[in-house]
């Protein structure tokens, strides 16, 4: 769910900064998923790929590896032009984001 070693490394083990970064990640990724959902509903594969790529990078940098993996799968489907397949990932994205949100509350 969250690679704490990676998060500690990028924050130099500053717990306050860890909480701040993860809270921002949850908020930003939630907004990206909402935009992704909109792009999917409008059949915009290129927008889906761009949004998934951006969110994947942010998640990967912070150590939210499971969320980054689902976003990578979504990005690949979008790059292949398969918006319907992208739509199938939305519930997994929502679920992983919820798990991250719950985990963040305990940091």
Image (tube, rainbow, N blue to C red):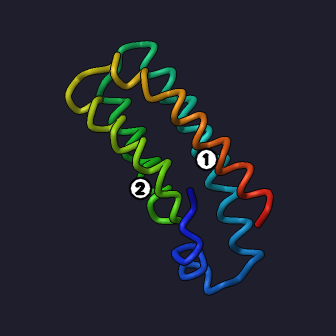
Element under disc 2: helix
Q: Position of residue 69 (x, y in %)?
A: 40, 48
| Foreground of the two, 33 or 100 | 100
Does residue 32 lie above or below 6 as drawn? above
Does residue 66 lie above or below 42 as drawn? below
Does residue 25 lie above or below 63 as drawn? above
Q: Residue at x 42, y 42 (%)?
A: 70
Q: Position of residue 76 (x, y in %)?
A: 26, 37
Q: Is residue 11 left or right of residue 47?
A: right
Whole-angstrom CA distance, mark 1 to mark 2, is 12 Å
Element under disc 1: helix
Residue lying furthest top in this view? Answer: 42
Q: Position of residue 102 (x, y in %)?
A: 74, 50
What is the number of callouts on the image? 2
To which residue does mark 2 refer?
Answer: 57
Task: Tell me whether the residue at label 1 lies in contact with that at label 2, contact meaning CB atoms closer than 8 angstroms.
Answer: no
């Amino acid at each position: 769910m969250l690679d704490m070693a990676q998060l500690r490394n990028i924050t130099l083990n500053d717990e306050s900064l860890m909480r701040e970064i993860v809270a921002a990640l949850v908020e930003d990724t939630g907004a990206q998923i909402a935009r992704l959902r909109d792009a999917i509903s409008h059949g915009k594969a290129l927008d889906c790929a761009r949004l998934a790529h951006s969110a994947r990078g942010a998640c990967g940098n912070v150590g939210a590896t499971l969320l980054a993996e689902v976003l990578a799968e979504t990005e690949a489907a979008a790059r292949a032009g398969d918006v319907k397949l992208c739509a199938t990932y939305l519930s997994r994205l929502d679920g992983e984001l919820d798990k991250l949100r719950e985990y963040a509350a305990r940091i």
